[in-house]
Image (cartoon, helix red, strand yellow):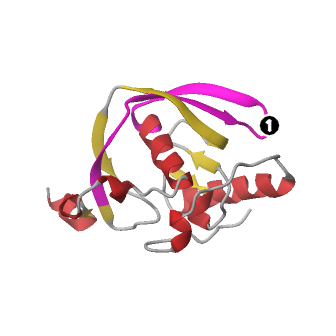
């Protein structure tokens, strides 16, 4: 496994739409392994392949319940709402309060190309929504007015 470079700021790859994965190959499995190692090294809870410069629909996440790998994830249902601060490994040092669905239903593949469906709530739902946005070239700051973006040091003073 290898630590990948996380693309940051105005890197144009962050605005690209990722392509579906047609088949799970050894190369895709290696990318998933590298993404997980990179996410843990950066102390994040989620990472999309776009953030490491790979335009494939791949997400890894771990909100404290163990690693979840999603290939070609889709949010097929959502309900409720939650508002909380978000940050991003690609936008270090800033946060903002973002409205997201409280509950989502997700469809994706696992490494065996089996279709899986599951429900996620609260932080896990927020994380998946954030990462799926990355696959569509959307950053959490797109939901905010410039005046709503907070520097991390300002948050610590609150």
Q: Nearer the viewer, residue 83 or 158?
A: 83
Name the main secondary structure of what is drawn in magenta: strand
Position of 93 compared to 148: left or right?
right
Residue 5, position in %: x, y?
A: 60, 72
Position of 17 compared to 72: left or right?
left
Residue 90, position in %: x, y?
A: 46, 65
Number of numbered discs on residues: 1
Q: Is residue 114 one of those drawn in magenta? A: yes
The quarter of the rendered structure image containing the C terminus is bottom left
> Which residue of the protein is positioned furthest toward the right in this rendering?
26
Quadrant position of residue 9: bottom left
Quadrant position of residue 107: top right
Secondary structure beneath label 1: loop
Q: Nearer the viewer, residue 90 or 155?
A: 90
Q: Is residue 94 visible?
A: yes
Q: Mark 1 = which residue?
A: 113
Residue 20, position in %: x, y?
A: 70, 49
Task: Write the residue at 28% across / 43% down.
Answer: 84
Q: Nearer the viewer, residue 89 or 105?
A: 105
Looking at the image, is 117 positioned above or below residue 93?
Answer: above
Q: Is residue 63 visible?
A: no
The quarter of the rendered structure image containing the N terminus is bottom right
Dot 1 surroundings within 10 Å: few (below 14), some, or many (20 or more)? some
Task: Write the residue at 77% across / 57% down.
Answer: 30
Task: Write the residue at 23% across / 59% down.
Answer: 145
Task: Write the residue at 54% across / 44% down.
Answer: 62
Q: Is residue 105 one of those drawn in magenta? A: yes
Position of 1 compared to 83: left or right?
right
What stretch of residues is rendered in magenta?
95-124
Quadrant position of residue 41: bottom right
């Amino acid at each position: 496994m290898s630590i990948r470079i996380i693309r940051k700021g105005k890197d144009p790859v962050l605005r690209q739409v990722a392509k579906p994965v047609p088949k799970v190959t050894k190369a895709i499995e290696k990318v998933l392994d590298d993404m997980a190692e990179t996410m843990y090294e950066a102390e994040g809870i989620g990472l999309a392949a776009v953030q490491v410069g790979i335009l494939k629909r791949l997400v890894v996440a771990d909100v404290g319940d163990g690693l979840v790998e999603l290939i070609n994830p889709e949010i097929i249902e959502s309900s409720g709402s939650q508002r909380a601060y978000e940050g991003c490994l690609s936008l270090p040092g800033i946060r903002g309060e973002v409205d997201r669905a409280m509950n989502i239903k997700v469809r994706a593949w696992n490494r065996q190309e089996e279709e899986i469906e599951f429900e996620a709530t609260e932080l896990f739902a927020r994380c998946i929504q954030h990462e799926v946005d990355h696959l569509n070239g959307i950053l959490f700051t797109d939901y905010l007015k410039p005046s709503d973006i907070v520097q991390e040091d300002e948050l610590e003073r609150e």
